[in-house]
Image (tube, grey):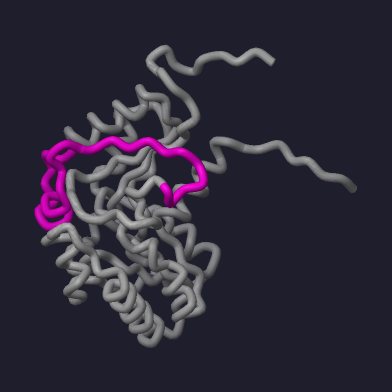
Amino acid sequence: MIYRSRLKSQNWAGETIGIIVLDCGYPYIPGNVANATTYDFPVRYAVAEGADNHRLIFERDPSLLEPFISAARRLQTEGVRAITGACGFMALFQDQIAAAVDIPVFMSSLLQVPFIHRITGKRVGIISADKSQLTREHLARSAIGETLPVALGGMEHCAPFRQAIFSPDGTLDDDAIRAGVIGVAQELRAGHADLGAILLECSDLPPYAADVQRATGLPVFDFITMINYVHQTLVRRPYHGYL
């Protein structure tokens, strides 16, 4: 077998997924998009310099496009085969970042919502870091049409979550956040008889996906389901077996 280099700019190999992370600092626990041990395969990170969660979520600062594109181009140069984000609110920049590079881009977990609705035929519950900040524009840029039925829940009333993520002191109360997200999921389940699945928008919530599933009995999607799915399309394995 003869191997050939993919890119002259690539000084190492074996990382399919590049992840653009925000310029924040708090505990990224296993299951978090920003914790490399979350994955069964190597990933590569790039920080969008100066892009913190307040500027993205609460200010919707359009000037963040420049550091996002810079990080995306850096990841492409370093050899990844697809680029994702680490906050569902990055949906605002999906189209521009995709246009700036030559590899697949899937910046927001929200991109899964049309697929989820199609396979379930039911309303999709979305648990966001702060549902009051999740606008029609975020949904539209994720191809979530106005007629697609969704139900929004948010973590804005969970004080331990807000402290850890938006007012970080270097600590994260895992048990308290778990209880908070389970509570939001149960409220969505109780309030919508036609709920078919739940999507965890926030990159900090996948550590609690199994707990949400146990509490609701529903399929649960998040950033990790999306990243795993795309990774598998990029590294298809041959099948071995027998008849």
Tell me, yes or no, whether the highlighted magenta stretch contains residue 45. Answer: yes
Tell me, yes or no, whether the highlighted magenta stretch contains residue 183. Answer: no
**Residue 64, located in which quarter of the rendered image?**
top left
**Residue 200, located in which quarter of the rendered image?**
bottom left
Q: Find residue 234 and report its horizontal and vertical position in percent.
A: 54, 36
* 50 relative to 198, above or below: above
Whether residue 148 is visible to the viewer of this picture, yes or no, is: no
Q: Which residues are magenta?
A: 37-65
Of residues 145 and 58, the one nearer the viewer is 58
Left or right of residue 22, residue 17 in this image: right
* 102 relative to 106, above or below: above
Q: Find residue 134 and report its horizontal and vertical position in percent.
A: 22, 62
Q: Find residue 184 and report its horizontal and vertical position in percent.
A: 31, 78
Residue at position x 42%, y 67% in the image: 209
Whether residue 229 is visible to the viewer of this picture, yes or no, is: yes
Of residues 36 and 185, the one nearer the viewer is 36
Left or right of residue 225, residue 129 in this image: left
Residue at position x 20%, y 62% in the image: 171
Residue at position x 39%, y 68% in the image: 208
Q: Find residue 161 and report its horizontal and vertical position in percent.
A: 22, 68
Q: Residue furthest front?
A: 171
Image quarter in which the N terminus is found: top right
